[in-house]
């Protein structure tokens, strides 16, 4: 099992309870959309095994992994291991999910663009079978 570091750039934030995440995930909002910025910026902490539902973004998203090891997967494509220092550029409308590996928490900064007032369309959960298939690789 990978040893966890406590070198997080930002405090953990509040537990996410919106029903679109499996496992324990936490959000610290760093910047809300405003008149100067057509994006939201958040620091997301995924505890071991935690993950998002499948989802899309109407104007894309960028993830900057700052700690740990996790997964990023686009629909009908192989999952990619993501780790500290990785930058993932997610195009608009691409169905995907991301989260921590079973052995390590993962923290990323998410930069999520808006189209009008929308920045995400949530879809079905990533099943345990889907996750377990990816995480045993």
Image: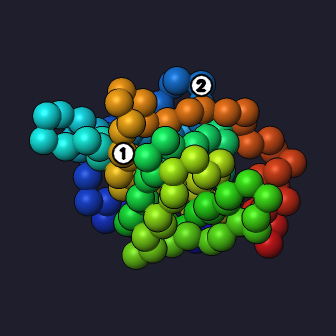
Crowd class of label 1 (few under 14; some 14 to 19; many from 20; radius 10 Å): many
Left or right: residue 120 versus residue 110 is right
> In the rendered view, would you say 126 is above or below 67?
above
**Secondary structure beneath label 2:** loop
**Secondary structure beneath label 1:** strand
Q: Residue extending furthest bottom?
A: 85
Left or right: residue 42 versus residue 73 is left
Q: Tell me where residue 137 appears, x and y as whole percent.
A: 80, 72
Cα separation between marks 2 and 1: 21 Å
Does residue 135 show up?
yes
Q: Tell me where residue 131 appears, x and y as whole percent.
A: 77, 52
Residue shown at 49% from the left, 41% from the top: 58
Q: Nearer the viewer, mark 2 or mark 1?
A: 1
Residue that carries the numbered disc 1 in the rendered image? 113
CB atoms of marks 2 and 1 within 8 Å:
no
Residue shown at 35% from the left, 51% from the top: 111
Does residue 65 show up?
no
Residue shown at 51% from the left, 57% from the top: 91
Q: Residue extending furthest top?
A: 18
Q: Tell me where residue 11 appears, x and y as whole percent.
A: 27, 47
Residue that carries the numbered disc 2 in the rendered image? 19
């Amino acid at each position: 099992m990978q040893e966890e570091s406590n070198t997080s750039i930002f405090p953990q934030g509040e537990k996410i309870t919106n029903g679109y995440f499996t496992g324990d995930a936490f959000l610290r909002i760093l910047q809300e959309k405003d008149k100067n910025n057509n994006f939201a910026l958040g620091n997301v902490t995924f505890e071991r095994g935690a993950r998002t539902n499948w989802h899309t973004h109407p104007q894309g998203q960028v993830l900057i992994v700052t700690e740990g090891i996790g997964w990023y997967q686009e629909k009908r494509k192989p999952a990619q291991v993501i780790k500290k220092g990785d930058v993932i550029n997610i195009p608009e409308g691409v169905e995907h999910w991301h989260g921590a590996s079973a052995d390590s928490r993962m923290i990323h900064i998410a930069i999520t663009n808006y189209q009008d007032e929308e920045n995400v369309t949530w879809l079905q959960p990533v099943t345990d079978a889907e996750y377990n298939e990816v995480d045993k690789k």
